[in-house]
Amino acid sequence: GTIVHSLALADLQVLPSAAVGVDEDGTIEFLDPNTRSAEASAEKHSWPVGSYSVVSSDPASVSFFFPGFFDTHIHASQYPNVGLFGKTTLLDWLNSYTFPLESSFADLKVADNVYSRVIARTLGNGTTTAAYYATVHTAGTNLLADLALKAGQRAFIGRCCMDANSPDYYCDKTLEDAQKATLEVIEHITKIDPNHDIVCPILTPRFAASCSKELLCWLGKLSTNTNLPVQTHISENMLEVELVKSMHTFADSYAGVYDKCGLLHDQTILAHAVHLTDDERALIAKRGSGIAHCPASNSALTSGETRVKWLLDAGVKVGLGTDVSGGFTPSILHTARQALLVSRHLSMEGDESHKLSIEEVLHLATVGGAEVCGLSNKLGNFLPGKKWDAQLITLDCKNSPVDIFPWELKTHEDLVAKWLFNGDDRNVTKVWVDGKLVAGTAFTS
Ligand code: GUN
Ligand code: FE
């Protein structure tokens, strides 16, 4: 069928009639760009007749295969609060909306309910890999890993560390508590998925403003010793930047705090990066850390506008994050739309070079996300050797939010534009992770 995927930042490849061969392990063996049939391709690659089955995009429909999305920053526990933020900004939003909700995850019934729903919702929107923050609770965080594994969604699972400057009712009471809980979660996830193929622990200092220097440095050492990835927030809001500066005087910048504690490396995901200085950008580029760009959240909480092109120009990796529930949507398609619009707001301030194209935001949603998650050798597009994490998009399905006027549409690129701006999960008919069908409107478990 029709394949659409990103090869490079501004290079979205459309193959109207292609065949992809996927083996039993979910690995792509071949991508034939021009073929009359899947059978012809299978024969060319010496696949015996009867040893394979064929999945096609519906020839009678406007449909195409697209790589699964990466959500490089999402707080699974905050899903009940999507859309609720009033006129708050980051620090008062945390205190009035977020910490009270997260503290309720001491109750495993709450965790089970919310986590099951957020996984189903994101998978249904085509998110095949998510970097999740859970809460401080060990049992709840372990449950999130269990549920993601069961649903077949690739997930980084982060147990929030916060031993400083946090409310008494929701924090790590001591450094030792944070350490013990972190190790327990790593142990649990390693037990259920020993090679971390589908679910992987991720070290999660909430942000520099909620962690002691001792905790940050312990996590940095742990990351070095275990090779586990790290996720945290950086320079989201100006008051936060000032708070971090006043709390951690041992470093001369926000990025410097993480760097001095060994937390800035090529397996680190930094969310937001709205207010970085030129020096911080250079440091992050040098360390090979990636940025989770969260445009919906940055607009909702009036945090600011991340300069994505400015980051990319310096060689910094960038992916997209919903940042539920600073962000109001669990959809990466919607987040890509927001990224495109925010880039236009930046360009309206006078510098056209900030403007992102459709190809570029879809790159960030897939290949960019894979880079940020350290998975670009195995995910992000449909090149042979990578895994079949994919979505089948159907634009003229029943109840589609996209109205197609065939005589007006000249190219596949037009269809992709229609999808980006008007599509939603009603268009996601099938979702595969690791070659296995796991979700979509045409999926029944
Ligand atoms: N900084 C620290 N915690 C959070 C959080 O939960 N969401 C966002 N957007 N920023 C944060
Ligand atoms: Fe966040």
Image (cartoon, rainbow, N blue to C red):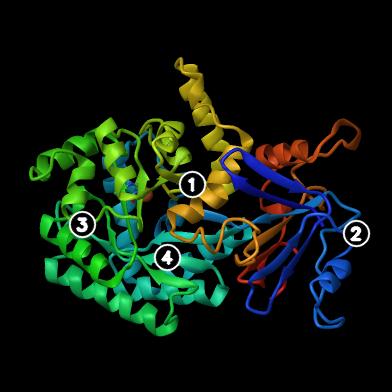
Alpha carbon distance from label 4 to label 1: 15 Å
Lateral position of residue 35 relative to residue 210, left or right: right
Residue situated in front as seen by the camera: 420 or 264: 264
Secondary structure state at the residue bearing disc 3: loop
Q: Earlier in the sequence, mark 4 or mark 2?
A: 2
Residue kind at label 4, given as amino acid type: Phe
Residue situated in front as seen by the camera: 107 or 411: 411
Quadrant where the N terminus sits is bottom right
Q: Residues within 10 Å of mark 1 (few under 14, many from 20)?
A: many
Residue at image mark 1: 320
Residue drawn at x 49%, y 46% is: 320
Q: Earlier in the sequence, mark 3 or mark 1?
A: 3
Residue 213 can be seen in this image:
yes
Is disc 2 in contact with disc 1, using a CB cutoff of under 8 Å? no
Residue at image mark 4: 156
Is disc 4 in contact with disc 1, using a CB cutoff of under 8 Å? no
Alpha carbon distance from label 2 to label 1: 36 Å
Residue at image mark 2: 36
Q: Residues within 10 Å of mark 3 (few under 14, many from 20)?
A: some
Residue at image mark 3: 262
Residue situated in front as seen by the camera: 156 or 374: 374
